[in-house]
Image: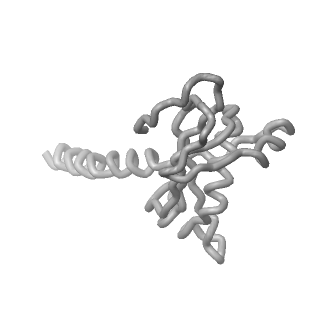
């Protein structure tokens, strides 16, 4: 009987660890992609539009993208993020999918992303300019 009770207690512990592991792993965001020479050149001309501002040219939304950074700690720990590095990663992700610009960009602190206490996270929508009529604004 003691053996069954011991197994029951082990299962109870696992029951609490599984949701915590899922939460920890689900809050990861991929880093910056490697760019070729053409993409590196395009990176310098990529335009970023903050939330509420839109380009005047017609465009098509490619996809919603996000980026995070956790390198802002002075001693190299995983405590805070750097918003400029998060923005650079966001732009690199956009260029990697052949975007001409990123719209609806917002940045801010995001707790527990990539095992960082207070990462900086930027989100936006990668777009490509087109000859058609402007795309209406769609929610993520």
Residue 134, located in which quarter of the rendered image?
top right
Q: How many marks?
A: 0
* Left or right: 17 in relation to 116: left
Residue 18 drawn above or below residue 121: above
* Left or right: 70 in relation to 15: right
Of residues 14 and 56, which is closer to you in this image?
Answer: 56
Residue 117 drawn above or below residue 1: below
Q: Most extreme residue toward the left, as rendered?
A: 1
- Which residue shows up at 38% across the image and 49% down it? 23
Q: Most extreme residue toward the right, as rendered?
A: 37
Where residue 12 sits in the image (x, y, percent)? 23, 49
Residue 128, located in which quarter of the rendered image?
top right
- Which residue shows up at 51% across the image and 30% down it? 135
Image quarter in which the C terminus is found: top left
Residue 48 drawn above or below residue 129: below
Q: Most extreme residue toward the bottom, as rendered?
A: 74
* Left or right: 6 in relation to 65: left
Where residue 117 sits in the image (x, y, percent)? 48, 66
Decide if residue 114 is in sight here. no
Residue 135 drawn above or below residue 67: above
**In the rendered view, how is the structure colored?**
one colour
Decide if residue 110 is in sight here. yes
Where residue 89 sits in the image (x, y, percent)? 66, 50
- Which residue shows up at 75% across the image and 41% down it? 34
Of residues 107 and 28, which is closer to you in this image?
Answer: 107
């Amino acid at each position: 009987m003691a053996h069954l009770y011991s197994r029951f207690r082990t299962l109870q512990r696992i029951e609490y660890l599984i949701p915590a592991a899922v939460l920890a792993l689900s809050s990861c965001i991929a880093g910056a992609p490697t760019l070729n020479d053409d993409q590196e050149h395009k990176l310098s001309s990529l335009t970023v539009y903050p939330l509420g501002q839109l380009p005047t040219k017609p465009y098509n939304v490619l996809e919603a993208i996000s980026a995070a950074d956790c390198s802002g700690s002075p001693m190299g720990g995983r405590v805070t993020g750097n918003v400029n590095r998060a923005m650079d990663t966001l732009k690199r992700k956009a260029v990697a999918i052949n975007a001409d610009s990123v719209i609806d960009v917002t940045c801010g602190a995001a707790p527990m992303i990539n095992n960082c206490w207070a990462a900086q996270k930027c989100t936006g929508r990668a777009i490509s300019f087109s000859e058609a009529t402007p795309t209406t604004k769609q929610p993520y």
